[in-house]
Image: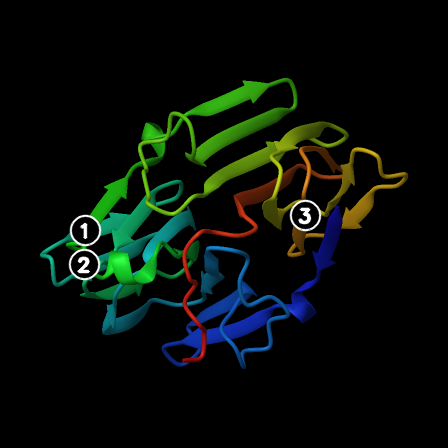
Amino acid sequence: MNVQIIGPEGQARGEFDGGRIQEQKPIGFPGEGASVVRLGPLFYWAWAHAGAKALLGMHPHKGFEIMSYGIAGQGLHKDTLGSESILEAGDIQLMQTGSGVSHSEGVEEGYEGFQIWFEPHYSEALKRVPTYYLFKHEQFPQDASPGVTVKTILGEGSPVHIVTDAQMFDVEIDPGQSYTYQLRPNRILAGLAIRGDGGSLKTDGSGSAAPFKNKDFAIVQSEQESELVIQAEGQKLRIVLIEVPSQVDYPLYQKGR
């Protein structure tokens, strides 16, 4: 089993619209400074904050399944399919870009959210008609147990269905409490800590826990089924988890091409 904790200094940075939008990228593009440029079919992951109202004009995408997750504030979407929508905290916006679609993105001051790219079989995806969906926070299942709340974004019970093999969870853990995650064989679990002062991650069979702080990116890879325990420390911890296979049975797109 391999465990990595990557601080913000090992992640990429980006900005848009004259710096009105600032991004921390746990998974970035080549040349952006990220130590991780993909995890299996998890192609890209950006965490954006808007210090002022901003706009990204129309730009094209194709092939990838691009998901935006609202954390705070409002994001605005408009595309060449005729879709117009407002992304609010807890909502998911999904573009399955298929043969090609263009969209514009606007944000209000105070917006915070993720943009995540998942990679299906690229050449097959290019044959599909592009689609757009908006899912509201209330549509997602939440499992509450003492000290822990888990929102399923991709997985059993979620209204979001993508072609790429992936699961995603938004987990909140009270101080001093822990959450146990069962990682399947030959899978990767990636987690970004977005609230709280940090915590620790312990895998079965390991003698010590790996500490992490707010804004750290944790990666766990295992060839065998493994039990992971995530513990919150002094403050309530919020960590977003994505699980993908270590390998897929189709060729992956070559970044930088």
Q: Is residue 231 above or below residue 87?
A: above
Amino acid type, residue under disc 3 in the picture: Val
- Is residue 233 shown to the viewer in this render? no
Q: Secondary structure at mark 2?
A: loop
Amino acid type, residue under disc 2 in the picture: Lys
Q: CA distance from mark 3 to mark 2?
A: 34 Å
Position of 230 compared to 52: left or right? right
Between 81 and 122, the residue placed more toward the observer is: 122
- Is residue 146 shown to the viewer in this render? yes
Where residue 137 sits in the image (x, y, percent)? Answer: 35, 35
When asked about the image quadrant of residue 112, the answer is bottom left
Residue position for label 2: 127
Query: Is the residue marked by circle 2 packed among few (<14), some (14-19), or many (20+) residues within 10 Å?
Result: few
Q: Secondary structure at mark 3?
A: strand
Position of 201 compared to 170: left or right? right
Between 92 and 63, the residue placed more toward the observer is: 63
Where residue 141 sits in the image (x, y, percent)? Answer: 41, 25
Residue position for label 3: 220
Query: Is the residue marked by circle 3 packed among few (<14), some (14-19), or many (20+) residues within 10 Å?
Result: many
Residue position for label 1: 131
Q: Which sits earlier in the primary sequence, circle 1 or circle 3? A: 1
| Residue projecting furthest to the top | 146
When asked about the image quadrant of residue 180, the answer is top right
Q: CA distance from mark 1 to mark 3?
A: 32 Å
Q: Which sits earlier in the primary sequence, circle 3 or circle 2? A: 2
Amino acid type, residue under disc 1 in the picture: Thr
Where residue 125 sits in the image (x, y, percent)? Answer: 26, 57
